[in-house]
Image: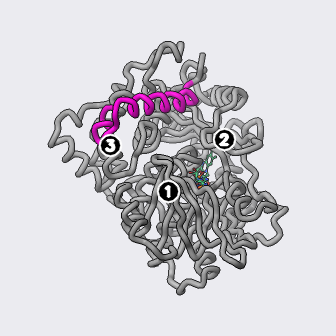
Amino acid sequence: MNRNEMWRRIEAHPTAWDMIVVGGGATGVGVAIDAASRGYDVLLLEQSDFGKGTSSRSTKLAHGGVRYLEQGNIGLVMEALKERGLLLQNAPHLVRDLAFIVPNYDWWEAPFYGLGLKLYQLLAGKYGFGTSRILSREETLEHLPTLKTEGLRGGAVYYDGQFDDARLLIHMATTAFEQGATLLNYVEVTGLTKDAQGFVDGVSARDAETGNEFRAAAKVVINATGAFSDLLRLKAEPAAAPMIVPSQGIHLVFDSSFLQGQSAIMVPHTSDGRVLFAIPWHGHTLVGTTDTPIAAATLEPVAMEEEIEFILATAAQYLTKAPTHDDVLSVFAGIRPLVRATGVANTAALSRDHVIHIDRSGLVTISGGKWTTYRRMAEDCVDQAATLAQLPEKPCVTQHLHIHGFHDAAKQFGALAVYGSDAHQIRKLMETDAQLGEPLHAALPYVKAEVIWGARREMARSVEDVLARRTRALFLNARAALAMAPAVFLNARAALAMAPAVADLMASELGWDEITRSKQLAAFRDVASNYVLHL
Ligand SMILES: Cc1cc2nc3c(=O)[nH]c(=O)nc-3n(C[C@H](O)[C@H](O)[C@H](O)COP(=O)(O)OP(=O)(O)OC[C@H]3O[C@@H](n4cnc5c(N)ncnc54)[C@H](O)[C@@H]3O)c2cc1C
C-alpha cells in the first residue's frame, strides 16, 4: 500500500467510480472494505491521515455496551456483541478479551450488577468472551491490587474486547487496498459535482501535499466524515438541516503502577451519570471518558481543564494512588458523531445506533454507531448505496473476511504483535540493518524499523502519522514522543526525544530536504503540545 500506486490507479481510471467514500475513519474504511470485497470499484479520500479523526481517539473497546443494557436496548447490545465476536475472529492479532471488574461498595450492587452482567454474557451466545460472575472482596483485589479497599464489599467480573484503534484502522485500509479499493490520505474533498438533474455525480478534491486539484466522477458518493458530516452535506444542499450533535470525550494516560494486574475497572455511574473505565493498554493505564457537548468539531480537539479535573477526581475515588497532573503522560480528546434524533425528516434508521441518511441530492451520509459495529454499518451503507446507484446486486462478504495481518498466535512477536503476520517483514528489516532494531525511546517499545515500515508500507506521510497512529507513542507518552524544546515547554522531563530520530528516518525514506524535515518537526510539536499537560 503506497501513495504512488494509489495515484497510478486514479490516473488509470478514466470512467466513473462505482462509489467514492469521503472520510478515512473506521466508518469510511469499513465501507471501502465492504464495497471492494463485493467487487465494486471504490475510491476513498481522507483529508488528513487515516484515523486522524475520532477513530484513533476511542476507549479502544470492542464492546456490546453494558450501559445500553441498562437502558433496555437489547437488540442493539446483541448486534454489537455479535460484531465484537466477528472482530475477534477476523483480527485476532489486534483484538483481545479483557476482564472488567465492577467494584461494589453497597450491598445491592453485587446482585444487581451480577445479574445484569450475566445477561450481557448470555446475549453474546456463540460469540461469548468469558463467564460473568460475582467476586468476593479478596477475588476483586486479586484482579485489581491497586483498587481502593475502603468500604469495598466485592465486585462483579465480565468480559469485553480491547483493541488498538489506529492500528486496526491501518490494517483495515490495507485490507481494502488488497480487495481492490483505491485509498488516499491527505486529499480533501473540497466540493461535490452534480449532473443536470442536480444529483451528486462526483467530487472535487485537493491533494494537500502538492496543492493539485482534481475531479473524480462516481455513481454514488458516500459521506463518512463523522463529526464533519454536516459540512459535506452543506456542500450538496446549502439548506440541509444539521444531523450531527458533536460531543467531546477525553482520556488520560498514566504509567502502569496506577492499575496493576491484567483487569480493567468499570465504574457504571460516575457523578455525572456516565460510565468510566480504567484500562491496562500497551503497558500503560488509560482512564476515560467524558461527554461534553461542543459547538463544532475540529480535527485536533483539545481536552478542557474541567474534563481533566473530572477524570483525575473520579480516578482518585477508586485507585489507591490518586493520580495528579504530574502523572499524566498523555491526554487526548475525540469527538462523538452523535446523530440528532429529530430535524431530519427522511432519515432511514437501520438500527437505533447508526443512521444512513440520503439527501435529495443523492449524497449518502453514514454516521453514529461505534467502532465495534463498523462492519455492520458498512454492510447496511453499501446495500443502500448500491441500490441508489442501481449497481448490480452483490452480497456482503465481510462477516468472515480476515483483516490484513491476520495471525492467531501473534503474541509470539512480542512488541511487534500488533503487526500480526507483517511482524516477519519488520524483523527482516532489522536483520538487514542492525540499526533499525534500535529503540526510539527507553520508555516505549518502538524500534526504528517501524518508522521505515510505516512510511514504506502503511502510507505514513508525516512524523505525526508515525508517532500518533502507526505507533501509539503520542497517545501513550506524549512527553517521550515530543522533541522537547525547553523554550516551548517549561517541563522538559522527557528522557529522550523521539521525533528528531523519526524525522531523520522518514527524511531518508521519503526524500525530505532539511526544510521539510524542520517543518515536519515544528508541525509535530504543535500537535503534540495538545497531548501534554502544562504544569
Ligand atoms: C471519547 C470516545 C470514546 C469512544 N470509545 C469507543 C469504544 O471504546 N468502542 C467503540 O466501539 N466506539 C467508541 N467510540 C466511538 C467511535 O470511536 C466512533 O464511532 C468512530 O471512531 C467514528 O468513526 P468515523 O469514521 O465515523 O469518524 P472519524 O474517525 O472522525 O472519521 C471521519 C474522517 O473524515 C475525514 N474528513 C472530514 N471531512 C473530510 C473531507 N472534506 N474530505 C476528506 N476527508 C474528510 C476526517 O479527517 C476524519 O478522519 C468512542 C468515541 C469517542 C469520542
**Residue drawn at x 39%, y 50% as measured from the top left:** 459
- Does 489 sit above or below residue 187? above
What is the x, y in percent for residue 10?
43, 66
Rounded to the nearest angstrom, the CA distance separating label 2 from label 1 is: 28 Å
Above/below status of 329 relative to 492: below
Which mark, by number, is residue 249?
2
Residue 98 seen in the figure: no
Residue type highlighted by circle 1: Gly
- Determine which residue is flagged by label 3: 510
Q: Nearer the viewer, mark 3 or mark 1?
A: 3
Q: How far, Cα to Cα, is label 3 from label 1?
A: 46 Å
**Which one is in front, 269 or 285?**
285
| Label 2 vs 3, first from the N-terminus | 2
The residue that mark 1 highlights is: 130
* Three-letter amino acid code of the residue under disc 2: Gly
Q: Quadrant of the C terminus?
A: top right
- Residue 531 in sight from this viewpoint: yes
* Mark 2 vs mark 3, CA separation in Å: 35 Å
**Left or right: 271 with respect to 299?**
right
Where is residue 169 drawn, in percent x and y? 47, 54
* Mark 3, secondary structure of its residue: helix
Cβ atoms at labels 3 and 1 below 8 Å apart: no
Does the magenta stretch mainly form a helix, a strand or a loop? helix
Q: Which residues are magenta?
A: 504-532
The structure residue drawn at horizontal position 61% and vertical position 75%, both measured from the top left corner, is 385
Q: Is residue 280 magenta?
A: no
Residue 512 part of the magenta segment: yes
Point out residue 350 in the picture as x, y percentages from the top left corner. 69, 72
Q: Secondary structure at mark 2?
A: strand
